[in-house]
Amino acid sequence: MTLRRRAQLIALVSALIFLALLTVLVVSHRDWSQSARNLALTNALSLEIVQLRTALFGYLLQPAEQPRALVDAQFENISELLTPEALSVAAMIRRNERTRHAWEEVRRLADEMRTLIADLVSSGREPRFAERDERTTNLIVVNSHNLILLMGQIQFQANARMLSASKRTNLALGLLLVGVSGLGFGIFLTLQRTILNPVQALREAALRVSRGALDQRMRSPRRDELGDLADAFDAMLDRLQETTVSRARLETEIVERQRAQAEIQRLNAGLEERVRRRTAELSAANQELESFAYAVSHDLRAPLRALSGFSQALMEDYGERLDGEALDDLQQIDIASRRMGELIDGILTLSRSTRGELRREPVDLSALARHRLEELAAAEPQRLVAREVEPGMVVPGDPTMLEAVMVNLIDNAWKYTGRTHDAIIRVYSMEREGKRWSCVTDNGAGFDMAYSERLFKAFQRLHRQEEFVGIGIGLATVQRIVHRHGGVVVAEGAPGQGATFRFTLPAAASEEPTG
Amino acid sequence: MTVNLARHIAPTAVALAMLIAALVAWRNWSPPAPAEPLTLAVAASALGAPLLVADRQGFLAAEGVQSNLLHYPTGKSALDAMLNGEAEVATVAETPIMFAGLAGKPLRVIANISSSTEHAVVARADRGIRERSDLRGRRIGVALGTTAHYFIHALLTDQGLDESAVELVDLPVREQAEALAAGRVDAVATFPPYSTECRRALGERARIFPAGIRYAGYGSLVVAPDLVERRPEVLARLLRAVDHAIGWMRANPEEARAIAAEAIGIDSTVLEETWDSSRLGLELGQGFLVLLNAEARWAIAAGLVPGAAVPNYLDLIDTSALARLRPDVVTLIQLR
């Protein structure tokens, strides 16, 4: 039942109880009022009857006109009071059989006495009526006595009734008071049970929640407004708990992130510092290395040239006197010194390949490839090599460096197709992995992919010098240039089946990678 | 906390109320007294009606009186039965009591149960009796020694006559109607139901002179003096039962009449005619004593009890039982 319905019910029941008690009180009070009127009437009648007796005695003692008039006057007074219309007394009579009897007796006796007085008056006090008059007088005296006694009974009843009516009224009043108090207490208890206690429980729960006990739940079995309120409170707490848990998690996460960010910033700060330092160190080392390489290549050239020159001079000047073995040794010295010279050139080339400022401008790789292939074909006209160059391969980059890349890759292809009939060298571009690749492919000697890592390392070779001459610096140079552009270079191939080198360069100018 | 308190208070209050009720019941409860046997001589008239009703309605039994009712045609014969020891209680009117008092018979009036203006002279109109004064010189039947005897005296004296002006014939009540109808008497002074029988016997020829307020007789409960001493409790029970019966009769007059008629063995309509002239009510008042004395003076003056003197009739009246039950109706001036 809802609180509203319950309140309406309480109001109805209270009103009914109050009305019932009020009715009892009103009825009691009316009864009391009537009893009071009864008593007043019986008191008045009693007084009149006493006065009647006095008048009667006066007449019996002195049978004269004046006492007779007094008696008649009293009878009139009594008659007025004894009318059947005396409703209040009639009501009293209805309730008490003895009072009714007494009342009837009073009326009867009053009438009889009037007749008896008339008889007495009419007898004229003749001696022959002496016994009759005595009998009449006796009857009058006895009746007047009885009348007074009967009135006493009626008065007693009226008093008793008045008393009981007063008691009933007081009782009704008390009942009303007790009833109203009880009603109030009952309403208080009901209110306490239905409203105050749940509200108190809700308040305590809310206080506990305010102190952080979010697992607090009312779980009210009630199906009224307060039950709904408790349910809503529980639902609110569910949401609050969820939100708080999420928030706590979020806060933890924020703290962790902040810590991580601080760590990152700290690391970044250190890293930048370190990078700056390392870059500086690296630049210095590079500088030093290049200087060293240059110095080495430059400074080594003089003794090398001396070694080569002196060995040639020895062969020219003392060739006839030297035996074949000595000549071979001298030739080996010469070859070795030349080889060393090539190596030194390679080192110089490698060191120079990435020196200087990296420029970014459109470079026509197709033109570079065509130009180089034509140079190679002109240098070795006896070789029949099919050459295919895709036109319009333009990439952004440093023209000098990219020329070195294309020269190295095309030279490589030219060299390793040296023993291949129907050699083909193709230069083209392709899309793969979302990037545009520039490729140089041949159908020459190829290589074993297991060793592909070694291809781009300086002075590392997969073929013997006798098969294909070279010092192993070309692909290292290619890789260094591509990497300096921020690009990637990949080699694919299989022994005897040719090789493909492809590289891609970032389209937009990026931070020039260092190192 | 308050709710818990209320939960404790309610059962405690109920338990307390039950305890108090049990105590009150225990205090008020008394084992029923064993029934007391009582033999009652009852007049076959309205006079005996309260006892008949008390017996038939079980009021006597309810009060613990094991009643044995003996029926007699008049109160006088009922009193004689009591005086002979045939009964312990008798219903009787004041005249036989008066005579018994003059004769020094042992009796005690313990209560009057009715007063009545039911006496009447039933006269033969066909013999020229139109007014009370026409009774002069007539032959009037009456059961001597009964209230009717004093009633005819009062009626005559009210007319300025006396018994010498008429011829009084002692006529038992049960013979009166037949005697009147047969013309052996000119009139009969009697009381119900015989007055009604007489009227019916005469039919249109009847002329009735009712007593009216000039003569009111009393119906009394009379017992042997020693009964008052020996068995006051049974008398108290008797009076309670009679009081109950009178209350019931006032509320249920028709049923009361039917019961009385059946007990007496007459038609209910016979009683109905005169029922209202009898006023029921327990009392012992001064009027009764005044009447006893007046009748006694008459009886002595009329030579009905030669050599007798008016006794103190107060000595024949015992108010103790009635005073215990209804002190308000004991209005006798008890100067001894």
Image (cartoon, rainbow, N blue to C red):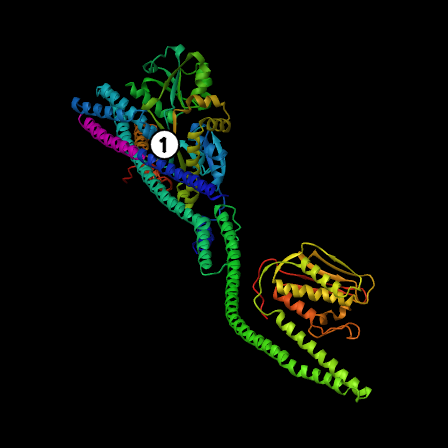
Where residue B281 sits, quadrant-wise, is: top left
Given residues B2 and A493, the one toward you in this image is: A493
Judged left or right of residue A507, residue B320 is left
Q: Position of residue B129 (x, y in %)?
A: 36, 12
Extent of the magenta region: A35-62
Classify A465 as above or below B37: below
Given residues A358 and A377, the one toward you in this image is: A377
Given residues A4 and A188, the one toward you in this image is: A4
Return the chain for callout 1: B
Amino acid type at mark 1: Phe
Q: Position of residue A144 (x, y in %)?
A: 26, 30
Q: Position of residue B305 (x, y in %)?
A: 34, 30
- Residue that numbered label 1 is attached to: B99
What is the chief secondary structure element of the magenta stretch?
A: helix
Quadrant for the C terminus of chain A, please. Answer: bottom right
Residue A215 seen by the camera: no
Where residue A179 sits, quadrant-wise, is: top left
Q: Position of residue B255 (x, y in %)?
A: 48, 28
Judged left or right of residue A408, residue A188 is left
Judged left or right of residue A452, residue A144 is left
Residue B55 seen by the camera: yes
Judged left or right of residue A362, residue A92 is left
